[in-house]
Image (cartoon, rainbow, N blue to C red):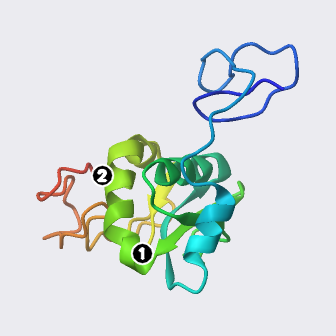
Amino acid sequence: MPYCPQCRAEYRPGFETCAHCDVSLVAELEPDYLSDDAMAQMLEGKDLVAVGTGAIESAKELRRAMGRACVPCLLGPPQDSGARSCAPRVSVYVAREDIERAGRVFEERLADLIDSGDLVAGEAGSVENSEGDAALDSCPACGATLSSASIEECTDCGLALG
């Protein structure tokens, strides 16, 4: 089966280009640094917090980015934020002690998903998408306290917030 090397989607034989990423497909994928099984084992018994909630593909991309950065995480049902959507949503969970590292991955790899509204930050910073309209009290990337709910960029790390 061919695979997309960027989003890791699996295609039926005969396809040559990823419909989402517009890159050539490959016969085999290189394994993520941390496999799903390895991450689950590392997180067993730990206090987990949601660092992102979004569409399944966005959450999978965040999970892959966390794995490449050696930040163990799991996908699971979202914490009920009150926001409703027709599309299924899933949360990405990390150990509480890894929130800072997860925030750096979130900032470095997936800031564009925040801008698109496909992914919203979880407990690392109470960001919601336009459906949730929650106020932002801390930066989801670095945890810095924000001075106002209408701030558009974190003054500590520069993450675009609005």
12 lies above or below 46: above
Which secondary structure lies at badge 2?
loop
Disc 2 + disc 1, Cβ < 8 Å: no
Residue 81 as seen in the image, left or right of residue 113: right
Please state which of the two labelled residues, at mark 2 or mark 1, is closer to the viewer: 1
Q: Name the disc covering residue 123, or none.
A: 1
Residue 68: x %, y % from top left: 48, 47
* Distance (Cα) linking label 2 and label 1: 18 Å
Q: Badge 2: how crowded within 10 Å, few (<14), some, or many (20+)? A: some
Query: Mark 2 sits on what residue?
Result: 162
Residue toward you, 159 or 101: 101
Q: Is residue 96 left or right of residue 14?
A: left
Q: Name the foreground residue: 157 vs 45.
A: 45
Residue 82 visible, this orientation? no
Image vertical order of residue 158 relative to residue 83, above or below: above
Residue 94 seen in the current view: yes
Residue 27 lies in quadrant: top right
- Where residue 79 sits in the image (x, y, percent)? 59, 77
Q: Which mark is residue 63?
A: none
Decide which of 53, 131 is in the foreground and name it: 53
Identity of the residue drawn at 46% across and 59% down: 120
Q: Residues within 10 Å of mark 1 (few under 14, many from 20)?
A: some
Asked where in the image residue 137 lies, by quadrant, the reply is bottom left
Q: Amino acid at mark 1?
A: Glu
Name the image quarter holding the N terminus: top right
Left or right of 72, for residue 156? left
Give the residue at x 64% y 69%: 40
Residue type at numbered disc 2: Gly
